[in-house]
Amino acid sequence: MRSRSALLLAASSAMAVLAACGGGDPQLSAADEPLRVGASPLPHAEILRHIDDELAADAGLDLEIVEFTDYVQPNVALDDGSLDANYFQTVPYLEEQEASAGYDFTALAPVHIEPLGIYSSSLTDLAALPEGATVAIPNDPTNAARALRLLEANGLITLADTGDAAPTSLDVQDSPKDLQISEVEAAQVPRSLADVDIAVINGNYAIEADLVPAEDALALEEAEGNPNANLLVVRAGDEDDERIQQLEGLLHSDEVRRFIEETYEGAVIPAF
């Protein structure tokens, strides 16, 4: 079984590649066609390739993996039918996207957690953070809120009580070291490391930047009770598609659990 993987660097090229993939034989049923799944390169697409290489054939599943380097286009492509599913996001991010873009998607069961971490190219201890230190965090509302809570958990800021609403940089009530917080597109945060004192980086982008969260992070999110597990997302009503159910079962198999644990050594943690 062969998996086609395309690294999409911009929305225009993403749509072109997906359009090229969309033409199927009209006489074929959905169950006969490949399951097109959009994913971030690491660890999501890597996990899917492991399934494709080792498990999918025996399950009778034909996977087509399409890689995206941002957090916006996988939902655009799922909504317009270019994808059958995507695997890159958390429920809080999905809910924010549904509210802002009007998507009607269904999230399936949690697969793994990628703890956000605080990293630095100049410091080895958060206690050494200087007065007026610069901090880069992701700019999307969900990951910005996670980053701010991680900074608070490590005593760097105090946030106002926002109730059920996600905190923003405007909710920083106290900052003992007068941190200067800059919001950057999540995929670009690792590139800002040389220009800031610390950066809060998503787990998948830390791995892509050759950072080892368990070793290089000055602080990590707690995995236990973390609501930010990554999972498979489909259009509402498609969750009973036989191919979706096959992939969902494989994503939660003992073989995939072992692959995650052995490959990522704590940088990615099974959530099942």
Image (cartoon, rainbow, N blue to C red):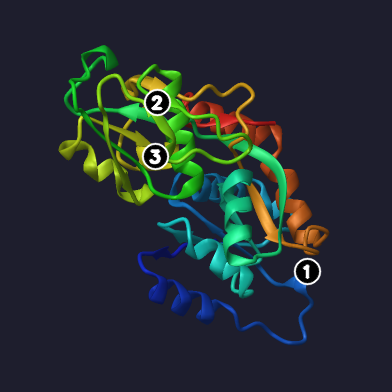
Work out whether residue 234 or residue 182 is closer to the camera in this orientation and state it: 182
Tell me the residue that label 2 is attached to: 151
Q: Can residue 1 be seen in this view?
A: no
On residue 31, which mark appears? Answer: 1
Q: Which residue is drawn at 40% across and 32% down?
A: 172
Residue 79 x, y percent position in the rendering:
62, 70
Q: Residue at x 63, y 59 (%)?
A: 98
CB under 8 Å between discs 2 and 1? no
Residue 29 x, y percent position in the rendering:
79, 77
Residues under labels 2 and 3: Cα distance?
11 Å
Residue 111 x, y percent position in the rendering:
64, 39
The earlier-in-sequence mark between 2 and 1 is 1
Q: What element carries label 1?
A: helix
Q: In which quarter of the image is residue 157?
A: top left
Q: Which residue is drawn at 59% across and 73% down?
A: 82
Query: Please, is residue 255 above or below residue 70 in the view?
Result: above
